């Protein structure tokens, strides 16, 4: 079970859970806007994005004019790498961004880079990332996880896999996938960081044996004959959280009405995309342009409509393709979603000690602001800020005991001496 939503737009919290976890009450949800007005504090905002299919709701909010409904102008700003998005958010050069969920949490905790209090306003999408293997490996029989592990045992060497950012989602899908078969991504293979738009060209040069990246780059690898499909991220975790609408806490606190307006515009775009296959096709045609993803339309449209191929002759309809709204189930910034990334950061040695999992999620995920935006649009709200999911190895995640969950994995980074982390 993943996303359980009531039919009413403003469902009440489960007794004890929502109120205890978020500190919210119905009175708080109805609180007056700062200064008694909902007018945006600033009306023009820069929203960074990478050329990926899941930039769609940000782009379509601007292209379809949803932003103007709320008194703002969204300026989509194409970026070259996740490191660039991080740095521009931290410096204030970008106001918001389509950004990796785990990157936001990593910056908040200062993992391997600048430390800045961050904010997640909403989840932009679920599913739709990929795990690809090089054509060279496929020619040797490695076409899925089991055959990859078999080849690694038969022909030991330094196998290299690419992901897009150390604390990001693609690194976590790659790590979880490999570890489920007993391959330790920290000690048994080498991992490198490659920005999404450079993934296919790097694979063509033979820089890696496989990669984890968002669409359309897995499909582009198949089209260009450099890689094959080994698994989808939804095979690792069906309906997993992926990109988020991120900002800094400073910006959200200083410009709460602007933050709400941007959230509402992107929510409307998300709902529009998921409303029909025709809208998805129109979205694909729009974001495929040179200004955005710069790829053939079919490089986006096939997988966004659930039509998959593996590059080896097999085709199928995926039951869990990329989703942008799902009647509100996609977009809610579940506290447990953010907490999951922290458990994996701990598992893979990015955190030396257990953080305050729930406390960090409460700081970052702007649940109340999202509730205000969604309620104004009559979008369904869940009864709890936590949700329950079962991942590919049968392990259940519900956020109830993150310390035990993180410590239960047998395949993990080598243990270091534990220190107390406030």
Image (spheres, rainbow, N blue to C red):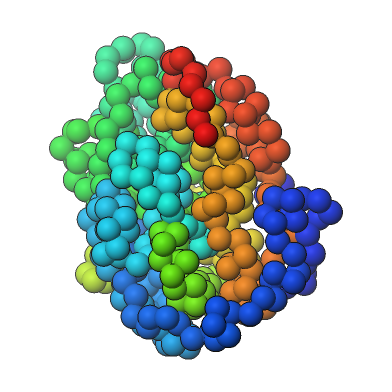
**Image label count:** 0
**Extreme-right residue of the structure:** 15
Tell me, yes or no, if residue 206 can be seen here. yes
Image: 133 above or below 275? above
The one nearer the camera, 420 or 355, is 420
Image spot of residue 45 (x, y percent): 34, 75
Tell me, yes or no, if residue 209 can be seen here. no
The one nearer the camera, 101 or 297, is 101
Give the residue drawn at x 46%, y 66%: 252
Q: Quadrant of residue 311?
A: top left
Q: Quadrant of residue 402?
A: top right
Image spot of residue 404 (x, y percent): 65, 26
Image spot of residue 170 (x, y percent): 40, 42
The one nearer the camera, 260 or 205, is 260
Give the residue drawn at x 32%, y 58%: 89
**Extreme-front residue of the structure:** 35
Image spot of residue 234 (x, y percent): 53, 45
Give the residue drawn at x 70%, y 69%: 28
The one nearer the camera, 214 or 218, is 214
């Amino acid at each position: 079970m993943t996303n359980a939503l009531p039919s009413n737009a403003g469902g009440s919290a489960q007794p004890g859970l929502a109120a205890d976890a978020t500190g919210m009450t119905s009175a708080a949800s109805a609180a007056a806007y700062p200064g008694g007005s909902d007018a945006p504090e600033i009306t023009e905002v820069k929203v960074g994005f990478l050329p990926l299919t899941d930039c769609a709701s940000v782009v379509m909010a601007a292209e379809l004019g949803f932003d103007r409904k709320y008194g703002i102008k969204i300026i989509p700003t194409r970026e070259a790498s996740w490191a660039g998005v991080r740095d521009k958010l931290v410096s204030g050069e970008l106001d918001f961004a389509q950004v990796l969920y785990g990157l936001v949490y990593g910056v908040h905790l200062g993992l391997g880079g600048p430390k800045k209090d961050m904010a997640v306003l909403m989840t932009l999408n679920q599913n739709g990332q990929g795990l690809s293997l090089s054509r060279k490996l496929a020619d040797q029989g490695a076409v899925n996880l089991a055959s990859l592990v078999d080849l690694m045992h038969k022909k030991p060497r330094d196998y290299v896999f690419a992901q897009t950012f150390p604390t990001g989602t693609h690194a976590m899908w790659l790590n979880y996938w490999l570890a489920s078969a007993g391959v330790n991504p920290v000690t048994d293979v080498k991992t490198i960081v490659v920005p999404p738009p450079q993934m296919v060209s790097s694979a063509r040069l033979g820089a890696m044996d496989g990669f984890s990246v968002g669409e359309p780059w897995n499909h582009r690898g198949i089209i260009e004959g450099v890689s094959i499909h080994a698994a989808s991220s939804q095979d690792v975790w069906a309906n997993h959280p992926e990109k988020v609408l991120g900002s800094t806490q400073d910006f959200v606190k200083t410009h709460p009405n602007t933050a709400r307006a941007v959230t509402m515009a992107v929510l409307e775009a998300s709902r529009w995309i998921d409303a029909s296959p025709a809208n998805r096709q129109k979205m694909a045609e729009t974001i495929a342009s040179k200004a955005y993803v710069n790829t053939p339309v079919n490089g986006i449209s096939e997988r966004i409509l659930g039509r998959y191929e593996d590059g080896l002759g097999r085709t199928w309809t995926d039951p869990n393709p990329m989703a942008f709204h799902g009647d509100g189930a996609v977009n809610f910034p579940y506290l447990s979603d953010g907490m999951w990334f922290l458990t994996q950061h701990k598992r893979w040695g990015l955190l030396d000690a257990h953080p305050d999992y729930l406390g960090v999620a409460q700081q970052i995920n702007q649940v109340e602001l999202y509730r205000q935006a969604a309620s104004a649009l009559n979008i369904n709200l869940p009864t709890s800020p936590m949700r329950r999911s079962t991942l590919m190895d049968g392990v259940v995640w519900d956020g109830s005991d993150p310390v035990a969950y993180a410590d239960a994995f047998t395949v993990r980074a080598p243990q270091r001496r534990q220190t107390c982390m406030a």
